[in-house]
Image (cartoon, rainbow, N blue to C red):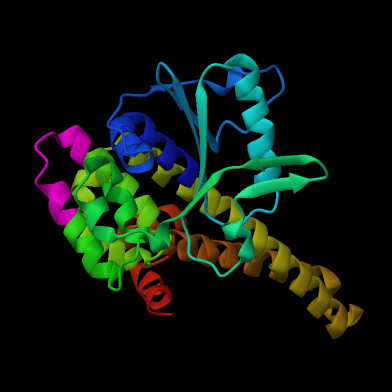
Amino acid sequence: MYDNTCKYLVEKFSQDFATWLLNKPISLSTLEASELTAEPIRADSVIFLQSEDEILHLEFQTRPDATIPFRMLNYWSRLYRKYPNKTIRQIVIYLCETKSSLVQQTQFQEQNTSHSFQVVRLWEQPTSSFQKTLGLLPLAILTNTKNPTETLRNVAQTISSIEDRNLKSSLSIHTYILAGLRLRGNIIKEILRSDIMEESSTYRLLRRQAIEEGLAEGRRQGLTEGIAQGIAEGMAQGISQGIAQGIAQGIAEGIERGKLQTARNMLRKGMAPALIAEVTGLSLPQIEDLSKD
């Protein structure tokens, strides 16, 4: 989800990212990972952009990753093999604040091989510069702000002033997704206009995925726990009371737990109670109780 959001922003607003990261307002075109080699590349997390004489390789990370230095070397060698006359800039952008030393690594060093790359930790970046640039606007919530809720309000206000409804809707949903790394879903939903987001095909796709994932996860967890508990209780009560009865009861409880787990997952994603009731079959009072919990 976060990979696709960042990829959209970079490709849609490549000039904004070039100005921020390269200090040059140049236009960049997408370089497909498949052009580099037959060996697969994690295309969901790798972004390559190019100009006439420069290649910008970006990776967005939500968490520290010990394999990053070697991956940077690996991708650099592939890029250099095909484009030896172009300057290659590699930048890893960490989205979520962490104290891990891994986000400080800017070099691969092993035996006689050394390779350097850049790292940007978003939580250290000044918020003001992101609020002034349309393409960087959804990332503002993850920057060095003391009041992320107020920052999101400012971002929402800027987005609401955009005249192009398609662009407004798209920026709203991508802001919604990234804000989820720092704020709770109910807070985000209060600030961002849901009617604008619902116009986005991305929002509809994500909502459908959330429902499907929530149902699958809820059923899996609920049934597994319910059946296991039912069997255990049935055996504990003894054969005379019926292991079969215990198993049947466990399955029934598992289905109910699955519905509750599905509802919790959907609440975390800020979905409307009426939609959750329709999907799960739970009553609105039950959903309200879950929301309070």
Find residue 205 and report its horizontal and vertical position in percent.
40, 38
Q: Is residue 83 above or below residue 281?
A: above
Residue 29 part of the magenta-drawn span? no
The residue that appears at 27% across and 31% down in the rendered structure is: 25
Which is nearer the eye, 76 or 97?
76
Q: Is residue 159 above or below residue 270?
A: above
User: Is 285 positioned to the left or the right of 260 in the image?
Assistant: left
The residue that appears at 64% across and 48% down in the rendered structure is: 107
| Direction right: furthest residue | 239
User: Is 46 positioned to the left or the right of 237 in the image?
Assistant: left
Query: Which span of residues is magenta-colored?
Result: 156-168
Q: Quadrant of residue 236?
A: bottom right
Whether residue 126 is visible: yes
Quadrant of the drawing holding the C terminus? bottom left
Q: Quadrant of residue 202?
A: top left
The residue that appears at 38% across and 51% down in the rendered structure is: 177
Residue 166 part of the magenta-drawn span? yes
Find residue 63 and report its horizontal and vertical position in percent.
57, 57
Q: Is residue 66 above or below residue 263?
A: above
Which is nearer the eye, 264 or 83?
83
Whether residue 41 is visible: no
User: Is 240 positioned to the left or the right of 280 in the image?
Assistant: right
Find residue 19 and report its horizontal and vertical position in percent.
30, 38
Q: How many marks?
A: 0
Find residue 134 and report its horizontal and vertical position in percent.
22, 42
Dominant secondary-structure state across the stretch colored magenta: helix
Which is nearer the eye, 39 or 55?
55
Q: Is residue 143 above or below residue 80?
A: below
